[in-house]
Image (spheres, rainbow, N blue to C red):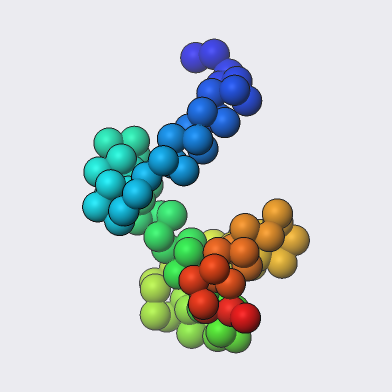
């Protein structure tokens, strides 16, 4: 398979920006992704929110039944990624 070009990735982001409701998001993402991929993304988002609340890895592991490696990966991006998690949490009123 050919490598996806940045233009194609940008067009995907532009399409996402056109979504107007949760219902539209559900339809688009279900056609775009497998159910497992959607669940994986939702789980990362939940882990990030739990980390921001200060929950320890052990509690997150127990509640979600996931490995500390997965939590550490999300924690890394939460602390030193592009700031997307924090930006969205502020927009959603999770953080000030």
Q: Which residue appears farthest toward the top when viewing the image?
A: 2
x and y, in percent, of residue 54 in the image: 60, 86
x and y, in percent, of residue 38 in the image: 35, 50
x and y, in percent, of residue 30 in the image: 27, 43
- Name the image quarter holding residue 65: bottom left
Residue at 75%, 61% in the rendered image: 80
- Name the image quarter holding residue 41: bottom left
Q: Which residue appears farthest toward the right when viewing the image?
A: 80
Q: Does residue 36 lie above or below 88 as drawn? A: above
Q: Does residue 58 lie above or below 13 as drawn? A: below
Q: Does residue 29 lie above or below 57 as drawn? A: above
Is residue 35 visible from the viewing direction of this image?
Answer: no
Residue at 52%, 78% in the rendered image: 94
In the displayed structure image, the side of residue 33 where residue 14 appears, left or right: right
In the displayed structure image, the side of residue 77 where residue 38 appears, left or right: left
The quadrant of the picture occupied by the C terminus is bottom right
Residue at 51%, 37% in the rendered image: 13
- Name the image quarter holding residue 48: bottom right
Is residue 18 visible from the viewing direction of this image?
Answer: yes
Q: Does residue 33 lie above or below 39 as drawn? A: above
x and y, in percent, of residue 15 in the image: 43, 35
In the displayed structure image, the side of residue 84 where residue 58 appears, left or right: left
Front residue of 18 and 95: 18
């Amino acid at each position: 398979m050919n490598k996806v070009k940045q233009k194609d990735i940008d067009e995907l982001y532009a399409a996402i920006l056109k979504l107007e409701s949760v219902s539209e998001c559900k339809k688009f993402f279900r056609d775009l992704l497998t159910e497992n991929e959607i669940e994986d993304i939702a789980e990362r988002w939940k882990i990030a929110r739990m980390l921001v609340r200060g929950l320890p890895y052990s509690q997150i592991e127990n509640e979600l039944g996931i490995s500390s490696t997965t939590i550490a990966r999300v924690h890394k991006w939460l602390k030193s990624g592009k700031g997307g998690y924090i930006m969205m949490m502020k927009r959603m009123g999770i953080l000030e």
